[in-house]
Amino acid sequence: MNEVSHGILRRFAVLLGAQWFREILQSIFLIVLARSSTTTYGEFMLAFSIAQVVVFVAEFGLNQHLVTLLGGRDSEKIELISEVSILKGGLLLVGMAAAQGFASWQHYDPSLRLLILVVVAGVGFQALTTSFYVAYQVEGRQHVEARIRAFSASLGFGYGLTSLLAGMSPVWVACYLALETSVGLGVALMETLSRARLSLRRPRLGRLVSRARGGLIFVVMALAAILYNKNNIFFLQSYAGSDGVAQYSVTWQMVDGISVLTSNLLLKNVLFPLFVNLNREGPGEMAAVARNCARWLLLASFPIMFVLFVESDRLIGLVYGEGYGRAIRLQQILVVTVLFSFLHNLAAYLMMAMKQERLLLGFYLVGLTFNLVVCAVVIPRFPLEGAAAAIVLTKGLMMLLTAGTCQGRMGLISRGAWLQTALAVLAGAALYALGTAGLFREAGEILALAPIGILALKWYREPSQPPGGTGPV
Protein backbone atom coordinates (compact mmCIF):
# COMPACT_ATOMS: atom_id res chain seq x y z
CA MET A 1 0.00 0.00 0.00
CA ASN A 2 1.57 3.30 -1.03
CA GLU A 3 0.96 6.91 -0.08
CA VAL A 4 -1.63 7.47 -2.80
CA SER A 5 -3.83 4.67 -1.40
CA HIS A 6 -3.93 6.48 1.94
CA GLY A 7 -5.37 9.53 0.18
CA ILE A 8 -2.51 11.78 1.26
CA LEU A 9 -2.40 13.79 -1.94
CA ARG A 10 -6.18 14.18 -2.13
CA ARG A 11 -6.50 15.28 1.50
CA PHE A 12 -3.57 17.64 1.17
CA ALA A 13 -4.94 19.09 -2.06
CA VAL A 14 -8.30 20.11 -0.63
CA LEU A 15 -6.70 21.75 2.40
CA LEU A 16 -4.08 23.38 0.22
CA GLY A 17 -6.77 24.96 -1.93
CA ALA A 18 -8.50 26.47 1.11
CA GLN A 19 -5.20 27.57 2.65
CA TRP A 20 -4.03 29.17 -0.58
CA PHE A 21 -7.32 31.03 -0.77
CA ARG A 22 -6.85 32.32 2.78
CA GLU A 23 -3.16 33.08 2.21
CA ILE A 24 -4.01 35.15 -0.86
CA LEU A 25 -6.53 37.16 1.14
CA GLN A 26 -4.12 37.54 4.04
CA SER A 27 -1.28 38.57 1.74
CA ILE A 28 -3.44 41.25 0.14
CA PHE A 29 -4.47 42.51 3.57
CA LEU A 30 -0.90 42.59 4.93
CA ILE A 31 0.48 44.24 1.78
CA VAL A 32 -2.12 47.01 1.96
CA LEU A 33 -1.40 47.38 5.68
CA ALA A 34 2.39 47.47 5.15
CA ARG A 35 2.12 50.05 2.40
CA SER A 36 -0.20 52.25 4.45
CA SER A 37 2.09 52.60 7.49
CA THR A 38 5.33 50.91 8.53
CA THR A 39 4.64 51.62 12.19
CA THR A 40 1.09 50.23 12.14
CA TYR A 41 2.31 47.17 10.27
CA GLY A 42 4.99 46.60 12.89
CA GLU A 43 2.44 46.92 15.68
CA PHE A 44 0.13 44.41 14.01
CA MET A 45 2.99 41.94 13.57
CA LEU A 46 3.95 42.31 17.22
CA ALA A 47 0.31 41.71 18.23
CA PHE A 48 0.15 38.67 15.93
CA SER A 49 3.31 37.26 17.50
CA ILE A 50 1.89 37.56 21.01
CA ALA A 51 -1.47 36.12 19.90
CA GLN A 52 0.23 33.18 18.23
CA VAL A 53 2.06 32.36 21.45
CA VAL A 54 -1.25 32.27 23.31
CA VAL A 55 -3.28 30.32 20.78
CA PHE A 56 -0.50 27.95 19.72
CA VAL A 57 -0.15 26.62 23.25
CA ALA A 58 -3.81 25.59 23.41
CA GLU A 59 -4.29 24.70 19.75
CA PHE A 60 -1.14 22.70 19.06
CA GLY A 61 -0.70 21.15 22.49
CA LEU A 62 -4.22 19.86 22.99
CA ASN A 63 -4.92 19.16 19.32
CA GLN A 64 -2.18 16.55 19.19
CA HIS A 65 -3.56 14.97 22.33
CA LEU A 66 -7.07 15.01 20.81
CA VAL A 67 -5.82 13.10 17.75
CA THR A 68 -4.72 10.23 19.98
CA LEU A 69 -8.00 10.34 21.94
CA LEU A 70 -10.32 10.30 18.91
CA GLY A 71 -8.75 7.31 17.18
CA GLY A 72 -11.42 4.61 17.06
CA ARG A 73 -13.76 6.38 19.52
CA ASP A 74 -16.41 7.96 17.30
CA SER A 75 -19.18 7.39 19.85
CA GLU A 76 -17.45 9.76 22.29
CA LYS A 77 -16.54 12.40 19.71
CA ILE A 78 -18.76 15.23 20.99
CA GLU A 79 -17.82 14.57 24.61
CA LEU A 80 -14.11 14.49 23.84
CA ILE A 81 -14.29 17.67 21.76
CA SER A 82 -16.20 19.49 24.51
CA GLU A 83 -13.76 18.38 27.21
CA VAL A 84 -10.71 19.45 25.22
CA SER A 85 -12.42 22.73 24.25
CA ILE A 86 -13.09 23.55 27.91
CA LEU A 87 -9.40 23.06 28.65
CA LYS A 88 -8.50 25.24 25.67
CA GLY A 89 -10.85 27.94 26.90
CA GLY A 90 -9.16 27.96 30.27
CA LEU A 91 -5.72 28.20 28.68
CA LEU A 92 -6.90 31.05 26.45
CA LEU A 93 -8.16 33.06 29.42
CA VAL A 94 -4.86 32.59 31.21
CA GLY A 95 -3.00 33.42 28.01
CA MET A 96 -4.96 36.62 27.42
CA ALA A 97 -4.22 37.77 30.96
CA ALA A 98 -0.55 36.91 30.50
CA ALA A 99 -0.44 38.81 27.19
CA GLN A 100 -1.76 41.95 28.86
CA GLY A 101 0.69 41.51 31.71
CA PHE A 102 3.55 41.19 29.23
CA ALA A 103 2.43 44.31 27.36
CA SER A 104 2.29 46.29 30.61
CA TRP A 105 5.69 44.97 31.68
CA GLN A 106 7.17 46.14 28.36
CA HIS A 107 5.53 49.58 28.84
CA TYR A 108 3.69 49.47 25.53
CA ASP A 109 1.43 52.41 24.70
CA PRO A 110 -2.24 52.03 25.73
CA SER A 111 -3.30 51.95 22.06
CA LEU A 112 -0.86 49.11 21.37
CA ARG A 113 -2.05 47.20 24.45
CA LEU A 114 -5.65 47.49 23.24
CA LEU A 115 -4.67 46.28 19.77
CA ILE A 116 -2.91 43.28 21.33
CA LEU A 117 -6.01 42.46 23.39
CA VAL A 118 -8.30 42.57 20.34
CA VAL A 119 -5.94 40.48 18.21
CA VAL A 120 -5.37 37.87 20.93
CA ALA A 121 -9.11 37.56 21.57
CA GLY A 122 -9.86 37.27 17.85
CA VAL A 123 -7.21 34.68 17.16
CA GLY A 124 -8.18 32.80 20.33
CA PHE A 125 -11.43 31.49 18.84
CA GLN A 126 -9.26 29.60 16.35
CA ALA A 127 -8.13 27.20 19.07
CA LEU A 128 -11.74 26.22 19.77
CA THR A 129 -12.56 25.78 16.09
CA THR A 130 -9.61 23.49 15.44
CA SER A 131 -11.02 20.93 17.90
CA PHE A 132 -13.67 20.20 15.27
CA TYR A 133 -11.08 20.28 12.49
CA VAL A 134 -9.09 17.59 14.29
CA ALA A 135 -12.16 15.34 14.28
CA TYR A 136 -12.53 15.87 10.53
CA GLN A 137 -8.87 15.03 9.99
CA VAL A 138 -9.05 11.79 11.96
CA GLU A 139 -12.14 10.83 9.92
CA GLY A 140 -10.40 11.72 6.63
CA ARG A 141 -12.94 14.51 5.97
CA GLN A 142 -10.48 17.32 5.29
CA HIS A 143 -12.83 18.62 2.58
CA VAL A 144 -15.28 19.78 5.28
CA GLU A 145 -12.52 21.66 7.06
CA ALA A 146 -11.48 23.25 3.76
CA ARG A 147 -14.97 24.53 3.03
CA ILE A 148 -15.35 26.07 6.49
CA ARG A 149 -11.94 27.71 6.34
CA ALA A 150 -12.63 29.25 2.94
CA PHE A 151 -16.07 30.56 3.92
CA SER A 152 -14.97 32.13 7.21
CA ALA A 153 -11.86 33.66 5.60
CA SER A 154 -14.02 35.32 2.93
CA LEU A 155 -16.14 37.07 5.54
CA GLY A 156 -13.28 37.96 7.86
CA PHE A 157 -10.86 39.38 5.32
CA GLY A 158 -13.70 41.03 3.43
CA TYR A 159 -14.41 43.08 6.52
CA GLY A 160 -10.72 43.60 7.25
CA LEU A 161 -9.89 44.97 3.81
CA THR A 162 -13.00 47.13 3.73
CA SER A 163 -12.27 48.67 7.12
CA LEU A 164 -8.59 49.16 6.26
CA LEU A 165 -9.34 50.93 2.99
CA ALA A 166 -11.99 53.02 4.75
CA GLY A 167 -9.31 54.37 7.09
CA MET A 168 -10.73 52.93 10.29
CA SER A 169 -8.55 52.75 13.40
CA PRO A 170 -6.23 49.72 13.82
CA VAL A 171 -8.35 48.32 16.65
CA TRP A 172 -11.51 48.26 14.51
CA VAL A 173 -9.56 46.78 11.61
CA ALA A 174 -8.27 44.01 13.88
CA CYS A 175 -11.83 42.88 14.56
CA TYR A 176 -11.71 40.98 11.27
CA LEU A 177 -9.99 38.15 13.18
CA ALA A 178 -12.89 37.78 15.60
CA LEU A 179 -15.34 37.70 12.71
CA GLU A 180 -13.38 35.05 10.80
CA THR A 181 -12.79 32.72 13.74
CA SER A 182 -16.26 33.05 15.29
CA VAL A 183 -17.94 32.27 11.95
CA GLY A 184 -15.69 29.24 11.52
CA LEU A 185 -16.50 28.04 15.04
CA GLY A 186 -20.24 28.45 14.51
CA VAL A 187 -20.31 26.62 11.18
CA ALA A 188 -18.10 23.78 12.48
CA LEU A 189 -20.32 23.34 15.52
CA MET A 190 -23.49 23.18 13.43
CA GLU A 191 -21.93 20.73 10.96
CA THR A 192 -20.76 18.44 13.75
CA LEU A 193 -24.09 18.50 15.59
CA SER A 194 -25.88 17.62 12.37
CA ARG A 195 -24.03 14.29 12.35
CA ALA A 196 -23.90 13.50 16.06
CA ARG A 197 -26.20 13.91 19.02
CA LEU A 198 -25.31 16.67 21.47
CA SER A 199 -24.49 15.46 24.96
CA LEU A 200 -25.85 17.80 27.62
CA ARG A 201 -24.06 16.06 30.47
CA ARG A 202 -21.87 18.27 32.56
CA PRO A 203 -18.19 17.41 31.98
CA ARG A 204 -16.82 15.38 34.84
CA LEU A 205 -14.02 17.00 36.80
CA GLY A 206 -12.05 13.77 36.95
CA ARG A 207 -12.06 13.38 33.18
CA LEU A 208 -11.06 17.02 32.68
CA VAL A 209 -8.13 16.55 35.05
CA SER A 210 -7.16 13.39 33.18
CA ARG A 211 -7.34 15.16 29.82
CA ALA A 212 -5.31 18.07 31.19
CA ARG A 213 -2.65 15.74 32.56
CA GLY A 214 -2.47 13.81 29.29
CA GLY A 215 -2.19 17.00 27.24
CA LEU A 216 0.24 18.80 29.56
CA ILE A 217 3.35 17.53 27.83
CA PHE A 218 1.99 18.69 24.45
CA VAL A 219 1.11 22.10 25.89
CA VAL A 220 4.60 22.63 27.32
CA MET A 221 6.09 21.44 24.05
CA ALA A 222 3.94 23.88 22.10
CA LEU A 223 4.86 26.73 24.43
CA ALA A 224 8.57 26.06 23.97
CA ALA A 225 8.15 25.83 20.17
CA ILE A 226 6.24 29.07 19.74
CA LEU A 227 8.49 30.97 22.13
CA TYR A 228 11.70 30.08 20.33
CA ASN A 229 10.01 31.15 17.09
CA LYS A 230 8.88 34.50 18.52
CA ASN A 231 11.52 35.47 21.11
CA ASN A 232 13.53 37.40 18.54
CA ILE A 233 10.48 39.55 17.73
CA PHE A 234 10.14 40.59 21.37
CA PHE A 235 13.87 41.37 21.63
CA LEU A 236 13.70 43.23 18.33
CA GLN A 237 10.84 45.42 19.54
CA SER A 238 12.97 46.45 22.51
CA TYR A 239 16.15 47.20 20.56
CA ALA A 240 14.88 48.31 17.12
CA GLY A 241 11.28 49.40 17.68
CA SER A 242 8.25 48.79 15.48
CA ASP A 243 10.19 49.66 12.33
CA GLY A 244 12.73 46.93 13.03
CA VAL A 245 9.92 44.45 13.66
CA ALA A 246 8.36 45.48 10.34
CA GLN A 247 11.64 44.96 8.42
CA TYR A 248 12.05 41.48 9.87
CA SER A 249 8.38 40.54 9.58
CA VAL A 250 7.89 41.24 5.88
CA THR A 251 10.50 38.67 4.95
CA TRP A 252 9.62 36.24 7.74
CA GLN A 253 6.04 36.24 6.48
CA MET A 254 7.31 34.99 3.12
CA VAL A 255 9.87 32.48 4.36
CA ASP A 256 7.97 31.08 7.32
CA GLY A 257 4.73 31.08 5.35
CA ILE A 258 6.14 28.27 3.20
CA SER A 259 7.17 26.26 6.25
CA VAL A 260 3.85 26.81 8.02
CA LEU A 261 1.92 25.81 4.91
CA THR A 262 3.73 22.48 4.80
CA SER A 263 3.76 21.95 8.56
CA ASN A 264 0.11 22.81 9.19
CA LEU A 265 -1.48 21.26 6.13
CA LEU A 266 0.58 18.28 5.04
CA LEU A 267 2.27 17.27 8.28
CA LYS A 268 -0.12 18.22 11.08
CA ASN A 269 -3.49 17.92 9.33
CA VAL A 270 -2.81 14.96 7.04
CA LEU A 271 0.30 12.95 7.90
CA PHE A 272 0.23 13.08 11.69
CA PRO A 273 -3.24 11.49 12.00
CA LEU A 274 -2.14 8.94 9.40
CA PHE A 275 1.12 8.22 11.27
CA VAL A 276 -0.83 7.64 14.49
CA ASN A 277 -3.15 5.15 12.78
CA LEU A 278 -0.33 3.39 10.92
CA ASN A 279 1.77 3.08 14.05
CA ARG A 280 -1.07 1.18 15.72
CA GLU A 281 -1.08 -1.30 12.84
CA GLY A 282 2.70 -1.67 12.79
CA PRO A 283 5.72 0.60 12.42
CA GLY A 284 6.88 -0.83 9.08
CA GLU A 285 4.36 0.89 6.86
CA MET A 286 4.63 4.15 8.82
CA ALA A 287 8.40 4.13 8.29
CA ALA A 288 7.98 3.54 4.55
CA VAL A 289 5.53 6.44 4.23
CA ALA A 290 7.79 8.66 6.34
CA ARG A 291 10.89 7.88 4.28
CA ASN A 292 9.18 8.73 1.02
CA CYS A 293 7.76 11.96 2.47
CA ALA A 294 11.18 12.91 3.84
CA ARG A 295 12.99 12.65 0.54
CA TRP A 296 10.31 14.69 -1.22
CA LEU A 297 10.44 17.39 1.45
CA LEU A 298 14.23 17.43 1.15
CA LEU A 299 14.04 17.84 -2.62
CA ALA A 300 11.25 20.44 -2.51
CA SER A 301 13.09 22.68 -0.06
CA PHE A 302 15.94 23.56 -2.44
CA PRO A 303 14.00 25.21 -5.29
CA ILE A 304 11.95 27.12 -2.71
CA MET A 305 15.09 28.39 -0.98
CA PHE A 306 16.73 29.20 -4.30
CA VAL A 307 13.83 31.32 -5.59
CA LEU A 308 13.43 33.16 -2.28
CA PHE A 309 17.18 33.90 -2.25
CA VAL A 310 17.83 35.05 -5.81
CA GLU A 311 14.53 36.91 -6.16
CA SER A 312 14.62 38.53 -2.71
CA ASP A 313 15.20 42.03 -4.12
CA ARG A 314 12.30 41.78 -6.55
CA LEU A 315 9.92 40.07 -4.14
CA ILE A 316 10.40 42.51 -1.29
CA GLY A 317 10.38 45.59 -3.52
CA LEU A 318 7.44 44.51 -5.65
CA VAL A 319 5.24 43.35 -2.80
CA TYR A 320 6.03 45.76 0.01
CA GLY A 321 7.51 48.80 -1.68
CA GLU A 322 10.67 50.83 -1.22
CA GLY A 323 10.53 51.17 2.57
CA TYR A 324 11.80 47.64 3.27
CA GLY A 325 15.26 47.61 1.71
CA ARG A 326 16.90 46.08 4.79
CA ALA A 327 14.58 43.09 4.57
CA ILE A 328 16.25 41.87 1.37
CA ARG A 329 19.43 40.78 3.11
CA LEU A 330 17.43 39.26 5.95
CA GLN A 331 15.50 37.08 3.52
CA GLN A 332 18.71 35.75 2.03
CA ILE A 333 19.79 34.69 5.52
CA LEU A 334 16.44 33.21 6.52
CA VAL A 335 15.84 30.98 3.47
CA VAL A 336 17.82 28.09 4.98
CA THR A 337 15.12 27.73 7.64
CA VAL A 338 12.84 26.23 4.98
CA LEU A 339 14.99 23.08 4.83
CA PHE A 340 15.44 23.02 8.60
CA SER A 341 11.70 23.38 9.24
CA PHE A 342 10.61 20.77 6.69
CA LEU A 343 12.79 18.03 8.16
CA HIS A 344 12.35 19.01 11.80
CA ASN A 345 8.56 19.17 11.61
CA LEU A 346 8.31 15.80 9.88
CA ALA A 347 10.59 14.23 12.47
CA ALA A 348 8.70 15.84 15.36
CA TYR A 349 5.36 14.42 14.22
CA LEU A 350 6.96 11.01 13.73
CA MET A 351 8.31 11.09 17.28
CA MET A 352 4.85 12.00 18.62
CA ALA A 353 3.26 9.18 16.62
CA MET A 354 5.85 6.78 18.11
CA LYS A 355 4.99 7.95 21.67
CA GLN A 356 8.35 9.69 22.17
CA GLU A 357 6.80 12.90 23.51
CA ARG A 358 9.08 13.15 26.55
CA LEU A 359 12.25 12.99 24.48
CA LEU A 360 10.79 15.49 22.03
CA LEU A 361 9.87 17.82 24.91
CA GLY A 362 13.49 17.69 26.07
CA PHE A 363 14.62 18.73 22.60
CA TYR A 364 12.19 21.68 22.58
CA LEU A 365 13.38 22.87 25.97
CA VAL A 366 17.00 22.67 24.79
CA GLY A 367 16.04 24.69 21.69
CA LEU A 368 14.23 27.32 23.77
CA THR A 369 17.17 27.76 26.14
CA PHE A 370 19.60 28.00 23.25
CA ASN A 371 17.41 30.55 21.49
CA LEU A 372 17.12 32.79 24.56
CA VAL A 373 20.89 32.83 24.98
CA VAL A 374 21.50 33.72 21.33
CA CYS A 375 18.81 36.44 21.37
CA ALA A 376 20.20 37.99 24.56
CA VAL A 377 23.79 37.99 23.30
CA VAL A 378 23.40 38.96 19.63
CA ILE A 379 20.27 41.09 19.17
CA PRO A 380 21.31 43.99 21.46
CA ARG A 381 24.46 44.45 19.33
CA PHE A 382 23.09 43.64 15.87
CA PRO A 383 19.27 43.86 16.08
CA LEU A 384 18.12 42.78 12.61
CA GLU A 385 20.97 40.43 11.76
CA GLY A 386 20.89 39.03 15.29
CA ALA A 387 17.16 38.29 15.04
CA ALA A 388 17.75 36.37 11.81
CA ALA A 389 20.77 34.52 13.20
CA ALA A 390 18.87 33.49 16.34
CA ILE A 391 16.08 31.75 14.45
CA VAL A 392 18.39 30.18 11.86
CA LEU A 393 20.68 28.68 14.51
CA THR A 394 17.76 27.49 16.65
CA LYS A 395 15.93 25.80 13.77
CA GLY A 396 19.19 24.20 12.65
CA LEU A 397 19.73 22.78 16.13
CA MET A 398 16.17 21.46 16.32
CA MET A 399 16.55 19.75 12.93
CA LEU A 400 19.74 18.04 14.07
CA LEU A 401 18.10 16.80 17.26
CA THR A 402 14.78 15.54 15.88
CA ALA A 403 15.69 14.45 12.36
CA GLY A 404 18.92 12.95 13.70
CA THR A 405 16.90 10.83 16.12
CA CYS A 406 14.56 9.58 13.39
CA GLN A 407 17.48 9.01 11.05
CA GLY A 408 19.10 6.73 13.59
CA ARG A 409 15.89 4.81 14.35
CA MET A 410 14.33 4.34 10.92
CA GLY A 411 16.78 5.64 8.30
CA LEU A 412 14.55 8.63 7.58
CA ILE A 413 16.52 9.73 4.49
CA SER A 414 18.67 7.21 2.66
CA ARG A 415 22.20 7.97 1.56
CA GLY A 416 21.01 7.55 -2.01
CA ALA A 417 18.41 10.29 -1.60
CA TRP A 418 20.98 12.60 0.00
CA LEU A 419 23.50 11.92 -2.79
CA GLN A 420 21.04 12.37 -5.65
CA THR A 421 19.72 15.61 -4.16
CA ALA A 422 23.22 16.95 -3.57
CA LEU A 423 24.24 16.18 -7.15
CA ALA A 424 21.12 17.90 -8.50
CA VAL A 425 21.80 20.98 -6.36
CA LEU A 426 25.45 21.16 -7.44
CA ALA A 427 24.48 20.75 -11.09
CA GLY A 428 21.90 23.50 -10.68
CA ALA A 429 24.48 25.81 -9.11
CA ALA A 430 26.86 25.25 -12.02
CA LEU A 431 24.11 25.90 -14.58
CA TYR A 432 23.07 29.04 -12.71
CA ALA A 433 26.61 30.40 -12.86
CA LEU A 434 26.89 29.63 -16.57
CA GLY A 435 23.45 31.02 -17.38
CA THR A 436 23.86 34.32 -15.55
CA ALA A 437 27.38 34.83 -16.94
CA GLY A 438 26.61 33.93 -20.55
CA LEU A 439 22.94 34.79 -20.89
CA PHE A 440 20.78 36.74 -18.43
CA ARG A 441 19.46 36.45 -14.90
CA GLU A 442 16.19 34.70 -15.62
CA ALA A 443 17.87 32.16 -17.92
CA GLY A 444 20.29 31.24 -15.15
CA GLU A 445 17.43 30.75 -12.71
CA ILE A 446 15.52 28.48 -15.08
CA LEU A 447 18.62 26.41 -15.81
CA ALA A 448 19.36 26.11 -12.10
CA LEU A 449 15.98 24.50 -11.44
CA ALA A 450 16.24 21.98 -14.29
CA PRO A 451 18.28 19.27 -12.44
CA ILE A 452 15.85 19.33 -9.50
CA GLY A 453 12.94 18.95 -11.92
CA ILE A 454 14.62 16.01 -13.66
CA LEU A 455 15.27 14.27 -10.34
CA ALA A 456 11.67 14.89 -9.22
CA LEU A 457 10.42 13.29 -12.45
CA LYS A 458 12.73 10.31 -11.88
CA TRP A 459 11.43 9.78 -8.36
CA TYR A 460 7.84 10.21 -9.46
CA ARG A 461 8.20 7.40 -11.98
CA GLU A 462 9.83 5.05 -9.48
CA PRO A 463 7.58 2.38 -7.92
CA SER A 464 6.83 2.98 -4.23
CA GLN A 465 8.78 0.94 -1.72
CA PRO A 466 6.82 -1.75 0.07
CA PRO A 467 6.15 -1.43 3.77
CA GLY A 468 9.34 -1.94 5.69
CA GLY A 469 11.29 -1.14 2.54
CA THR A 470 14.94 -0.46 2.53
CA GLY A 471 16.37 2.19 4.77
CA PRO A 472 19.78 3.68 4.10
CA VAL A 473 21.42 2.36 0.96
Image: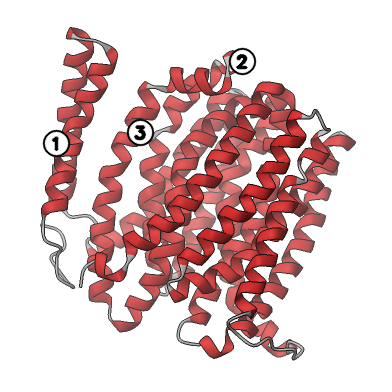
Q: Quadrant of the C terminus?
A: bottom left
Q: Nearer the viewer, residue 101 or 201?
A: 201
Q: Is residue 333 visible?
A: yes
Label whose residue precedes the other's in the sequence (3 or 1)? 3
Q: Is residue 366 above or below residue 190?
A: above
Q: Is residue 415 visible?
A: no
The picture quadrant where one finds residue 54 is: bottom right
Q: Residue at x 49, y 34 (%)?
A: 254
Name the residue furthest right. 110
Secondary structure of the residue carrying numbered label 3: helix
Task: Look at mark 2 in the image and give the residue it sits on.
Answer: 323
Q: Residue at x 65, y 29 (%)?
A: 245
Q: Is residue 396 above or below residue 411?
A: above
Rendering coords of residue 146 (x, y %)? 51, 59
Task: Look at mark 1 in the image and give the residue it sits on.
Answer: 423
Q: Amino acid at mark 1?
A: Leu
From the viewer's perspective, is 62 left or right of 143? right
Q: Amino acid at mark 3?
A: Met
Q: Residue at x 57, y 47 (%)?
A: 228
Secondary structure of the residue carrying numbered label 2: helix
